[in-house]
């Protein structure tokens, strides 16, 4: 090979290496957080959030001085809030909510003196709250609530000690029954998200320690399945926290913010097909706990919460398929 050919071959190899190196360094990160319109009501933590159709609803909570009873509707397309009929039950925080057959439901919680077990339905068409049959378990707060396969469920929480029972709600008969046994640990301040007919439960605290077990609940068969632990030794991650928030979007689940020996902004994405978590771009608001979340078909929001005695009223939209921008 003559010198000219050797030079060209070497130059080509050098350019290929350089191109690969530049491509790796310049790879874009996806998962952008964009700040939305500030909430119109009082800043708060531990509020109940649920979604009916294309509207999000935020109810109750605690603002550092008072337990709240107001109801707010969020228009995700127009990015604005409308105040709706006040919640007529006892003002509270730490309650749970879910959506079932076009209605919103809210129950349990804490009013500053007592744990609660009353249960309420919200009709968005009539803008009206109606009291329903009391929750079937003990009065509690820090529980989780979700709806799958046409039934509502409330479980775990704190009634003087941590709990692990689950109760099923039938909106046709307005009745509760003890659900199939949950094999996980007792806990309070856990979080849950729903993908299809499966609910995924994890995080929370028991006897002062973070729980690492992670479970799915099949609403069709009413069975629990234990999945990989949140600090699985075969995977390079540890997601041990409490008082975080979760949502599902585009077939994936997310754990965002919370308390983990200190407040965090971490954002973890769960793939139910592989049973694996991956860390995503961090939440861009201030680190916090006791936040709330709305999840629609094409977008999700994390809002409210607290840091110590400071309570937030900001709202952040998460766009997993959008390139990260530093200044939103």
Image (cartoon, rainbow, N blue to C red):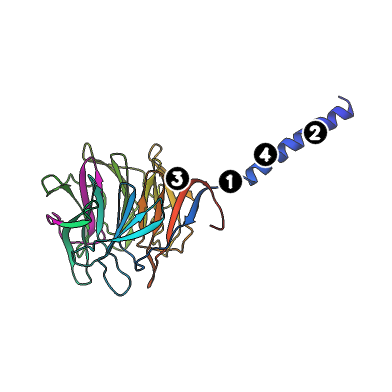
Which numbered disc, 3 or 2, marks the residue that appears first in the sequence?
2
Residue picked out by circle 4 = 20
- Which span of residues is magenta-colored? 131-157
Kindly check if marks 1 and 4 are in contact, taking CB atoms under 8 A apart as contact: no
Spot the residue most to the top. Answer: 1
The count of marks equals 4
Please indicate whether residue 36 sits to the left or right of residue 53 in the image: right
Residue picked out by circle 3 = 235
Task: Let me know if residue 298 appears in the view.
Answer: yes
Spot the residue most to the bottom. Answer: 65
Report the Cα–Cα distance between label 3 and label 1. Answer: 24 Å
Report the Cα–Cα distance between label 1 and label 4. Answer: 14 Å
**Percent x, y of residue 197:** 28, 39
Report the Cα–Cα distance between label 3 and label 2. Answer: 40 Å
Q: Residues within 10 Å of mark 4 (few under 14, many from 20)?
A: few
**Percent x, y of residue 275:** 39, 40
Report the Cα–Cα distance between label 3 and label 4. Answer: 28 Å
Which numbered disc, 1 or 4, marks the residue that appears first in the sequence?
4
Look at the numbered disc 1 and give the secondary structure of its residue: loop
Residue picked out by circle 2 = 10
Report the Cα–Cα distance between label 1 and label 2. Answer: 30 Å
Look at the numbered disc 3 and give the secondary structure of its residue: loop
At 35% from the left and 56% from the top, the residue drawn is 74
**Percent x, y of residue 103:** 22, 49
Look at the numbered disc 2 and give the secondary structure of its residue: helix
The image quadrant where one finds the N terminus is top right
**Percent x, y of residue 312:** 40, 66
Residue picked out by circle 1 = 28
Closer mark to the observer between disc 3 and disc 2: 2
Spot the residue most to the right. Answer: 3
């Amino acid at each position: 090979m003559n010198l000219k050919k050797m030079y060209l071959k070497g130059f080509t190899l050098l350019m290929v290496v350089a191109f690969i190196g530049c491509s790796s360094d310049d790879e874009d990160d996806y998962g952008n957080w964009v700040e939305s319109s500030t909430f119109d009501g009082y800043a708060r933590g531990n509020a109940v959030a649920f979604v009916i159709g294309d509207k999000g609803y935020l109810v109750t909570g605690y603002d550092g001085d008072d337990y709240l009873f107001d109801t707010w509707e969020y228009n995700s397309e127009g990015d604005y809030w409308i105040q709706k009929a006040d919640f007529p039950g006892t003002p509270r925080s730490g309650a749970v909510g879910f959506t079932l057959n076009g209605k919103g439901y809210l129950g349990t919680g804490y009013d500053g003196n007592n744990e609660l077990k009353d249960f309420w339905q919200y009709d968005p068409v009539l803008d009206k709250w109606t009291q329903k049959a009391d929750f079937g378990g003990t009065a509690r707060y820090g529980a989780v609530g979700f709806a799958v396969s046409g039934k509502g469920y409330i479980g775990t929480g704190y009634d003087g000690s941590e709990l692990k029972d689950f109760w099923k709600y039938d909106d046709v008969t307005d009745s509760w029954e003890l659900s199939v046994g949950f094999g996980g640990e007792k806990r309070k301040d856990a979080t849950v998200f729903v993908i299809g007919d499966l609910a995924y439960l994890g995080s929370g605290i028991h006897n002062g320690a973070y729980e690492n077990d992670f479970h799915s609940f099949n609403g069709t068969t009413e069975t629990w399945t234990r999945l990989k632990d949140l600090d699985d030794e075969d995977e390079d991650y540890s997601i041990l926290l409490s008082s975080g928030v979760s949502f599902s979007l585009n077939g994936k689940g997310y754990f965002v913010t919370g308390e983990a020996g200190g407040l965090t902004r971490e954002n973890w994405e769960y793939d139910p097909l592989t049973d694996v978590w991956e860390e995503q771009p961090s939440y861009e608001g201030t680190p916090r706990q006791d936040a709330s979340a709305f999840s629609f078909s094409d977008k999700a929001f994390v809002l409210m919460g607290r840091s110590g005695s400071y309570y937030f009223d900001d709202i952040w939209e998460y766009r997993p398929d959008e390139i990260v921008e530093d200044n939103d």
